[in-house]
Image: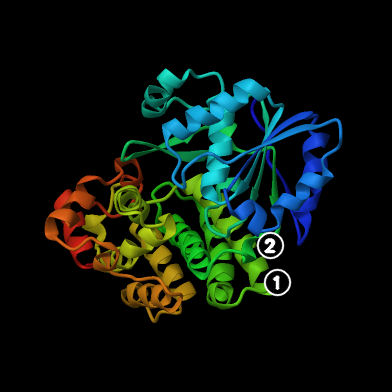
Amino acid sequence: MSPRRPVVRYGRGAIASLPRLVEGLGATRVLVVHGAHSFEASGASRMMESFGRRTLVRRWHDFSPNPAVDDVARGLDVVRELRPDAVVGVGGGSAMDMAKLLCVLDGVPGTDLADRVRSGPAADTRRMKLVLAPTTSGSGSEATHFAVVYVGDAKYSVAGAGLLPDAAVLDPALTESGTPHQRAASGVDAIAQGIESLWAVGGDDESRGLARRGLRLLLAGIEDFVAAPHAGVARSMVVGSHLVGRAINRSKTTGAHALSYRLTSRYGVSHGHAVALSLGAFLDAHAHADASDLRTSVRPSEYRRALDDIAGVLGASGPAESGARFVALGRRIGLPMRLADVGVRTEPEVRGLAAAVNAERLSNNPVRFSQDELADLLMRCS
């Protein structure tokens, strides 16, 4: 089956309606994939009381914060045992990505999983219903048709229409329980997605419009959200991150995301923080690029408009000031913004990050960078 356009349920306390939503999809056997701690801490676990007596429900959370193929294999063992009609993903990006992966990789033998992920065939169909509910404001996974999985240190993206959910539940109250660092890292990831979507080669008028709307909400709310979350800013962050999730669903991400994955897998830096570490330098490099530096498919006038839009939402006087504005924001919300702060201290280590760049995401960047140029860019972040 190919999923329809996802139904979205929004509002404080909306998580309580999720069981009825799932049962309304015809499910009587349900696998709930959730974060190890966030499910209880966020209050999402209270929804379990609302499932009907005739619905068989099993919870599962035996996977790492950055899901790998071995984690998927364990989850598929649970799927084979339970044979659910629906999978519900409740948590941050990792929990929602794992729920999506279990749906589209159902039936793939564990011995074939790594090859299936590497070969990258479109994951357009699935047997089970899929419902997602984020407990963080950042990944936008509930709005995208792709999911991240690691094979060793290498990050892969499984993509296809089958990864879009049947429904998403957006409950701002769930997002307030994380630590300040978690709120900062997830929020800055959403901001990075919005910025990258504005200049992405794969962007269009719709994705850029979604990104602009999302960024205005995110940048207005993130500092209060990190310092002392309350209902108003939680709403801004939930809606803003969902809008930029819809934006990258069309445009995909670019250079800063392309460089982030090794920082996460090798140095243990949380994903959003890893993206933020290089985005300021990308903003500087993009501000000083000229037409000859752009990919041939990029129209210089649209590119300059994107940079002006980014400067505007960041409150910068122009594109040349955007990088400094973004780095200052990261520091205000408590994120160390130098590579040395997260353990990348030598030139060989920096060049190793550049060599491990995700080529697919980098090809979506409007400005061309060689590996040496990426290393030079990263040196400016050290």
Question: Which is more toward the observer, 297 or 152?
Answer: 152
All told, the count of numbered labels is 2
The reply to whether residue 301 is in sight is: no
Name the residue carrying label 2. Answer: 172
Circle 2: residue type: Pro
Rounded to the nearest angstrom, the CA distance separating label 2 from label 1 is 7 Å
Expressed as whole percent of the image width and height from the top left, the position of residue 27 reads 77, 30
The disc at residue 56 is none
Circle 1: residue type: Ala
Expressed as whole percent of the image width and height from the top left, the position of residue 364 reads 36, 47
Expressed as whole percent of the image width and height from the top left, the position of residue 88 reads 67, 39
Q: Name the element at disc 2.
A: helix
2 and 1 marks in contact (CB < 8 Å): yes
Name which residue lies at 48% across and 17% down: 109
The vertical placement of 282 against 117, above or below, is: below
Q: Name the side, left or right, on which 9 lies relative to 88.
A: right
Q: Name the element at disc 1.
A: helix
